[in-house]
């Protein structure tokens, strides 16, 4: 009797945790959700469609995520290097308070596009499982790579993937 | 000094959980530590009535190794001097008084206790995607006491990193060689050993966007020489002193503690945070203790924080503790009059200030902190009241100052 | 209730409580330095060591012994 109770409570807990892991994640090989999001500074609506034919590095970030302090300067460099070949970096900010994002950008100024998804509506469609999470989208709008977190070494393999997709 | 620190494993979920002997703080950057850290701390501890005084100097360094590891090392030096209670006796009116070691002209600092303690410890932490593992060890030395310790900790993230399971294990091997003194009647070649083990199991949980809770249980087991080699116990037959022996404690102790910590964020108070802890601990020497602590972390303008703190502690006396004993030492298996095994309560309060500066080249962060705390140890503060041990009341203040660099 | 069962129950309850769904992108407040369980590692160690030298309780946070020059 006691073991049965234990087993059923374990089962219940697992079920409830599984339910929290929402399905419908955007996987590699699937077309990226066609978002429309305002830019952080000018509040100008921007769509994914505008970037058709280009290779996009879509980064979901926030001012409080420590690895973003490492990723931003490195992404900026990669962007400068490859933008002439049709590469764009689009960073979607998820801060609830815009002021924190602006403060972060003062510390880490970048030349690529910053959009804002304060309510997380689009990040939830992509399923951002950790902060930061990035998606590399090819010229046809299909997700080809998903990367969780960021360590300074990661830039090399990301640049390799981007260069491969630019060549296609 | 055993550095009881917690490892912050993730920045997005600041889940710390472990503090075991020799464990060091490794600050975090996401899952993997990518910055170098240097910490320096000074502490000044002064007891009331010209008792003990300690100056503490500590430094810690940590560095990332490759993509998934962090190595750290920690050095401490305590400079201890002053006097300390040695035994209790009855004065002419029958009242119990505490007798302290007097100033001894032969000690190098002109006081009866003059001691230097040095300790070094190191730690290696390895980070996986949803777990972390660390191994550490250290050595601490004073001229009459040496300790070698080893520990391991691990954590596992579950539930989309909302729940973290923590475990830890540590062991310490101590060697005691009491120095010759008027308060130590043992032969100069007397040596004793003590082995301590401690195990921790805990869980940290994100409750919502603004609150966290952590609950840990620890089990400790100690064997060996646990008496205080410089303390004595007086025995009375009526009003006449009948026996006088060195402190004699059991050579085994099992202890258990359960700590729960709750942290809550208040956006409306400029992102202040409230920390409250409650711990119950018990051991087979009969000491049950309650610890309650609360602190409020208030950010003020421009990287400053002010942190008031309050703590209440209460313990029961050990089974073999009495201020003075009746009869003779042969009537008891263990006996001690050490004030630390008595029933008492403590109240302490403190205030701390911290200032953080970001991106001051070449450092990615500088942090300065300084704090003051006053602590009062009184028999009458014991839960349920106690007016028997007031002769042992004392207090201390502790001042700390530190700075931390990240680069 | 046996100790093991009690521990298991706590873990299960806590994992159930988690389902007040906090998304990774909503953890900004939890990432603040004042929200860490230990905000100042070195100072925490010093205060624990001091308390351990003057009191009999140990553990929970770990409270270690070691190199106790306690008098």
Image (tube, rainbow, N blue to C red):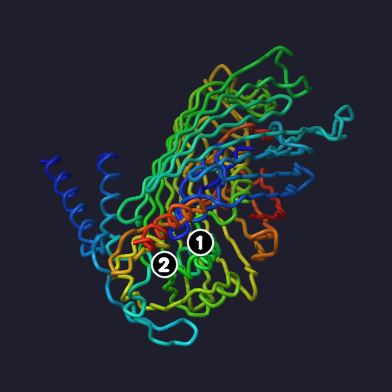
Distance in Å between CA atoms under marks 1 and 2: 10 Å
Q: Residue at the spot x=56%, y=16% of the render?
A: B330
Packing grade of label 1 (10 A; few <14, some 14-19, many >=20) is many
Q: Residue at the spot x=19%, y=48% of the render?
A: A10
Q: Are dots 1 and 2 in contact, CB under 8 Å?
A: yes
Q: Do the residues at discs 1 and 2 belong to one chain?
A: yes
The residue indicated by pointer 1 is A71
Packing grade of label 2 (10 A; few <14, some 14-19, many >=20) is many
Side (left or right) of B262 relative to A11: right
Q: Residue at the spot x=60%, y=41% of the render?
A: B72
Q: Residue at the spot x=56%, y=29% of the render?
A: B149
The N terminus of chain A appears in which quarter of the rendering? Answer: top left
In the displayed structure, would residue B87 be above or below residue B385? above
Q: Position of residue B316 (x, y in %)?
A: 50, 42
The C terminus of chain A appears in which quarter of the rendering? Answer: bottom left
The residue indicated by pointer 2 is A59
Side (left or right) of B400 relative to A101: right
Residue B370: tell me if it is visible.
no
Which chain does the residue under circle 1 lie in?
Answer: A
Classify residue B347 by image quadrant.
bottom right
Classify residue C51 by image quadrant.
top right
Q: Position of residue B336 (x, y in %)?
A: 59, 29
Q: Position of residue B380 (x, y in %)?
A: 58, 51
Q: Earlier in the sequence, mark 1 or mark 2?
A: 2
Q: Secondary structure at mark 2?
A: strand
State the mark number for residue B319: none
In the displayed structure, would residue B266 be above or below residue A4? below
Q: Position of residue C32 (x, y in %)?
A: 51, 65
All told, the count of numbered labels is 2
């Amino acid at each position: 009797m006691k073991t049965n109770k234990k087993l059923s409570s374990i089962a219940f807990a697992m079920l409830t945790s599984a339910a929290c892991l929402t399905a419908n994640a955007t996987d590699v090989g699937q077309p990226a959700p066609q978002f429309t999001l305002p830019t952080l500074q000018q509040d100008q609506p921007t769509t994914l469609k505008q970037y058709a034919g280009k290779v996009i590095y879509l980064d979901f970030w926030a001012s409080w995520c420590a690895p973003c302090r490492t990723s931003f300067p490195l992404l900026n460099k990669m962007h400068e290097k490859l933008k002439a070949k049709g590469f764009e970096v689009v960073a979607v900010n998820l801060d609830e308070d815009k002021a924190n994002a602006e403060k972060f950008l003062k510390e880490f100024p970048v030349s690529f596009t910053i959009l804002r998804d304060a309510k997380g509506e689009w990040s939830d469609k992509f399923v951002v499982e950790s902060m930061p999470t990035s998606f590399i989208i090819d010229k046809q709008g299909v997700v080809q790579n998903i990367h969780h977190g960021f360590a300074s070494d990661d830039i090399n393999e990301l640049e390799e993937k981007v260069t491969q997709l630019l060549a296609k | 000094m055993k550095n009881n620190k917690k490892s912050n494993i993730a920045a997005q979920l600041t889940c710390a959980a472990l503090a075991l002997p020799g464990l060091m703080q490794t600050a975090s950057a996401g899952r993997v530590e990518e910055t170098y850290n240097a910490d320096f701390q000074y502490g000044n501890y002064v007891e009331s009535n010209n008792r003990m005084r300690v100056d503490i100097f500590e430094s810690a360094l940590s560095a990332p190794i490759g993509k998934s590891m962090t190595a750290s090392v920690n050095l401490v030096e305590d400079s201890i001097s002053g006097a300390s209670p040695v035994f209790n006796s009855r004065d002419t009116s029958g009242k119990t008084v505490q007798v302290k070691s007097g100033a001894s002209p032969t000690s190098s600092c002109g006081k009866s206790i003059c001691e230097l303690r040095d300790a070094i410890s190191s730690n290696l932490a390895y980070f996986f995607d949803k777990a972390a593992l660390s191994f550490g060890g250290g050595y601490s030395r004073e001229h009459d006491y040496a300790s070698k310790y080893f520990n391991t900790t691990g954590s596992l993230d579950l539930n989309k990193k909302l729940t973290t399971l923590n475990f830890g294990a540590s062991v310490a091997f101590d060697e005691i060689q009491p120095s010759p003194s008027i308060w130590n009647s043992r032969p100069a070649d007397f040596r004793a050993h003590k082995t301590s083990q401690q195990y921790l199991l805990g869980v940290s949980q994100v409750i919502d966007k603004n609150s966290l809770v952590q609950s840990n249980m620890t089990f400790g087991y100690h064997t060996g020489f646990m008496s205080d080699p410089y303390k004595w116990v007086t025995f009375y037959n009526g009003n006449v002193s009948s026996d006088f022996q060195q402190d004699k404690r059991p050579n085994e102790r099992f202890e258990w503690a359960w700590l729960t910590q709750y942290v809550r964020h208040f956006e409306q108070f400029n992102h202040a945070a409230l920390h409250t802890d409650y711990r119950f601990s018990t051991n087979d020497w009969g000491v049950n203790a309650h610890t309650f602590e609360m602190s409020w972390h208030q950010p003020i303008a421009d990287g400053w924080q002010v942190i008031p703190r309050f703590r209440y502690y209460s313990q029961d006396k050990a089974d073999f503790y009495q201020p003075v004993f009746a009869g003779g030492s042969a009537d008891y298996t263990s006996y001690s009059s050490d004030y630390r095994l008595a029933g008492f309560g403590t109240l302490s309060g403190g205030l701390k200030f911290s200032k953080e500066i970001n991106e001051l080249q070449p450092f990615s962060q500088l942090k300065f902190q300084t704090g003051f705390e006053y602590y009062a140890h009184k028999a009458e503060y014991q839960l349920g009241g106690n007016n028997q041990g007031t002769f042992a009341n004392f207090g201390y203040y502790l001042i700390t100052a530190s700075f931390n660099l990240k680069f | 209730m046996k100790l093991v069962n009690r521990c298991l129950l706590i873990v299960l309850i806590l994992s159930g409580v988690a389902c007040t769904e906090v998304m990774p992108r909503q953890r900004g407040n939890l990432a603040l330095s004042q929200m860490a369980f230990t905000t100042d590692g070195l100072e925490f160690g010093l205060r624990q060591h001091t308390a351990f030298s003057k009191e009999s309780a140990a553990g929970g946070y770990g409270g270690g012994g070691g190199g106790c020059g306690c008098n």
